Image (cartoon, rainbow, N blue to C red):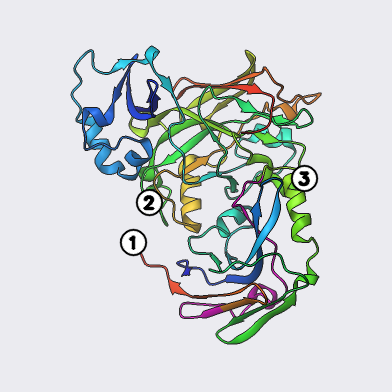
């Protein structure tokens, strides 16, 4: 995962990702764990750019079918526990998110919906911020682990 | 030069517009890629090769004998909103201090003359005529002065938007299948003065929008430089640059697109982008 040049505040959170299957109707057919990185040194009106830097969505290699009950989510940065929560804290369930999105957009099989991140991200405590060399480890019990190591952006020239 | 993607029945091929004729670029010089996206990804070399093509009379095929398609499928379509003061007044929003950014979702691109499918009678679907910047060279941390060097050229665009969705769902409301007509020409920078490009939008022949790039709050070079400060831009990326006043939702009473309507974005510099409107679900 690349730390953008000049970015002193790179936020990260663990998010449950719903994998959409649309045959016959949109549903969350599977789940993955995603590390969701975001630049916080960018104006709010450019949030789509701030969330779209290359490498900033890290999805677990493994996916899991729909779980029976609540799932525990954890995130550590350099071994220090930063997030510990449960999908029972979700305000809108994956099924409710799918339904809300489907009212304004025709979902397609293979679309992925990040369902949000719980308390404890670096942004919530104004740091400490991950930087080059940091190791981020996320885990959603019953779904998957996902991890990433940070590197500095290399000047292409 | 003016680049198009054209077909005479088979697959789309990259072409060079010369008056009322189209030259097949790959056939004219096998070193030039056969697709516009391939040409953009090798823009430095391709522009020289295109400029070096012999200009003999009678080359190519008559424009009347081909159909022009979507110039290319952009890897990314970004857009800045609120970039003409008169549109801000009509939408009752403040002028931004930095160029805002949104996304047009994958699958929203639509070729010229292809039908825009409304996907339901209850949907309030609106047009927004715009100019699209086409990136021709990787851009990261470029100055405003250097930004034009990263732009290959401009196209016409229509930032189709649903007005019946919550503001929090703006990306979904703008991201529907076919909600981003583009083209038909990619006009390269050597033919243009970025501060002197204009366009109009007509719906069923009635003038609805008029714009001139001299009235932009954030000129094109500012938008490219601002975006490239946050993330790397790549060849083929497209940036929509905002719409002027005159959208359907800004009228009294508001009017929205209906099956059978025809939206035409037209520019003396960039050509004519026509989109017929049809009912039915998005494909």
In this picture, which residue range is highlighted in magenta? A107-136
- Residue B164 placement, left or right of B131: right
Whether the magenta-drawn stretch holds residue B238 is answered as: no
> Going 61% across and 49% down the picture, which residue do you hit?
A109
The foreground one among B206 and B282 is B282
Tell me, for residue A156, which label it has, or none.
1
* Residue B75 spot, x, y in % from top left: 46, 46
Chain letter for the residue marked with disc 2 in the picture: B
Give the quarter of the figure containing the N terminus of chain B.
top left
C-alpha span from label 2 to label 3: 35 Å
Q: Nearer the viewer, residue B281 or B150?
A: B281
Of the image marks 2 and 3, the number of the one nearer the N terminus: 2
Q: Quadrant of residue B5?
A: top left
Do the numbered discs 2 and 1 sit on residues whose CB atoms are within 8 Å?
A: yes
Q: At numbered mark 2, what does the secondary structure look like: helix, strand or loop?
A: loop
The single residue placed furthest to the bottom in the displayed view is A79
Where's the C terminus of chain B, which quadrant?
Answer: top right
Q: Find residue A39 and report its horizontal and vertical position in percent.
A: 57, 65
Q: Which chain carries label 3?
A: B
Q: Name the residue under label 3.
A: B166
Name the main secondary structure of what is drawn in magenta: loop
* Percent x, y of residue B186: 41, 30
Mark 2 = which residue? B138
The residue that appears at 54% across and 38% down in the rendered structure is B241
**B168 sits left or right of A12 in the view:** right
């Amino acid at each position: 995962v690349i730390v953008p040049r000049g970015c002193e505040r790179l936020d990260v959170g663990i998010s449950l990702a719903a994998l959409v299957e649309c045959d016959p109707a949109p549903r969350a057919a599977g789940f993955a764990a995603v590390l969701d990185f975001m630049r916080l040194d960018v104006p709010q009106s450019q949030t789509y750019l701030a969330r779209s830097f290359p490498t900033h969505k890290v999805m677990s290699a493994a996916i899991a079918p729909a779980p029976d009950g609540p799932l525990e989510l954890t995130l550590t940065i350099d071994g220090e526990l930063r997030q510990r929560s449960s999908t029972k804290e979700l305000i809108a369930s994956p099924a409710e998110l799918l339904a809300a999105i489907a009212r304004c957009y025709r979902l397609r099989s293979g679309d992925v919906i990040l369902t949000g991140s719980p308390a404890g991200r670096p942004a919530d405590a104004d740091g400490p911020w991950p930087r080059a060399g940091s190791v981020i480890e996320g885990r959603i019990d019953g779904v998957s682990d996902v991890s990433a190591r940070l590197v500095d952006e290399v000047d292409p020239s | 030069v003016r680049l198009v993607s054209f077909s005479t029945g088979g697959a789309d091929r990259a072409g060079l517009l010369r008056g009322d004729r189209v030259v097949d670029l790959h056939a004219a010089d096998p070193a030039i890629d056969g697709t516009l996206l391939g040409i953009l990804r090798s823009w430095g070399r391709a522009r020289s090769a295109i400029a070096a093509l012999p200009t003999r009379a009678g080359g190519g095929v008559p424009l009347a004998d081909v159909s022009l398609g979507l110039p290319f499928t952009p890897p990314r379509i970004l857009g800045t909103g609120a970039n003409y003061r008169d549109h801000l007044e009509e939408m009752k929003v403040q002028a931004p201090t930095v160029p805002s950014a949104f996304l047009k979702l994958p699958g929203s691109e639509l070729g010229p003359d292809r039908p825009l499918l409304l996907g339901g009678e209850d949907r309030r679907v609106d047009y927004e005529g715009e100019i699209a910047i086409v990136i021709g060279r990787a851009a990261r941390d470029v100055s405003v002065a250097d930004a034009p060097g990263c732009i290959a050229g401009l196209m016409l665009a229509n930032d189709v938007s649903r007005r019946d969705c919550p503001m929090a769902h703006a990306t979904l409301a703008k991201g529907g299948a076919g909600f981003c007509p583009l083209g038909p020409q990619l006009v390269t920078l050597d033919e243009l003065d970025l501060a002197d490009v204009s366009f109009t939008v007509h719906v069923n022949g009635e003038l609805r929008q008029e714009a001139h790039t001299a009235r932009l709050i954030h000129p094109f070079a500012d938008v490219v430089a601002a975006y490239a400060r946050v993330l790397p831009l790549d060849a083929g990326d497209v940036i929509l640059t905002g719409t002027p006043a005159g959208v359907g939702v800004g009228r009294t009473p508001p009017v929205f697109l209906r099956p059978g309507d025809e939206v035409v974005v037209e520019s003396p510099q960039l050509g004519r982008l026509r989109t017929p409107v049809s009912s039915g679900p998005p494909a």
